Amino acid sequence: MIEFYHVFKQYVKDQYALYDISLSIQKGEFIFLTGASGAGKSTLLKLIFKEELPSKGQILVNSNNINLIPQKELYLLRRNIGIVFQDFKLLANRTVYENVAIPLVVRGERKSAIDKMVVKVLAQVGLSHRKNYFPTHISGGEQQRVAIARAIVGNPKIVIADEPTGNLDTELSIEIFKIFEKINANGITTIIATHDRHLLNMFPKRTLRLDQGKYTPSGPAEATL
């Protein structure tokens, strides 16, 4: 599903954000990506959906070498990847329904199809009753659930979340992680970057650990390359 082969990333000469990363994530896996702040977690995630390019090395997603995907075809890669950010990135002047519908509108789906898919995912995340609210009128936990609904509304094969509970308290964080477990149970490969040790202990999954840009496999079900 996702393979890194000797991947390096430099933003500054002689300093590596990622150093010689080789790893493999299988279809349908639930993966935690962890490490201290500045360890390279966000950079690694950005490489998967080609927001950043590696300085050296190869990255395969669904057997496609993403280094070779031209800009005009990048949407084909990203259509299969749902992304959830720590700061939600919702449009304040759009309702919950409209925020979730955005990927489908951009894709050019018919209105009837959009309505069916949006209603379905809002029910999945427990927000059917909030569909006509604006983001500023709902809680932080609800805003993150809207962001998750937006990420999965297009039926992606992969969901990536970068510190999705960083702005939430423990109780809400647990709720969010349970939603990700349900998403993963539907066969969607799920990758979550987090430094929250308590949540890592509560939800034992395969863990990929970064330390100053270097990868160390740890946790249950370690995979060999």
Image (cartoon, rainbow, N blue to C red):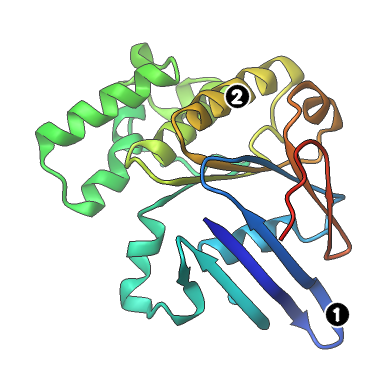
As drawn, is 60 to the left or to the right of 73?
right
Residue 176 tag number = 2
Q: Residue at x 39, y 62 (%)?
A: 77
* Secondary-structure class at tag 1: strand
* Residue 150 x, y percent position in the rendering: 40, 37
Q: Amino acid at mark 1?
A: Gln
Q: Is residue 70 above or below residue 174?
A: below
Front residue (pair 142, 39): 39
Q: Could you tell me which secondary element the residue under label 2 belongs to? A: helix
Q: Amino acid at mark 2?
A: Ile
Q: Which residue is mark 1?
A: 15
Q: Nearer the viewer, residue 198 or 147?
A: 198
The answer to whether any part of residue 54 appears in the image is no
Tell which circle, 2 or 1, labels the residue nearer the N-terminal end.
1
Q: Is residue 189 visible?
A: yes
Residue at the front extreme, as displayed: 224
Q: Residue at x 89, y 63 (%)?
A: 212
Q: Please give the label number shown on residue 158.
A: none
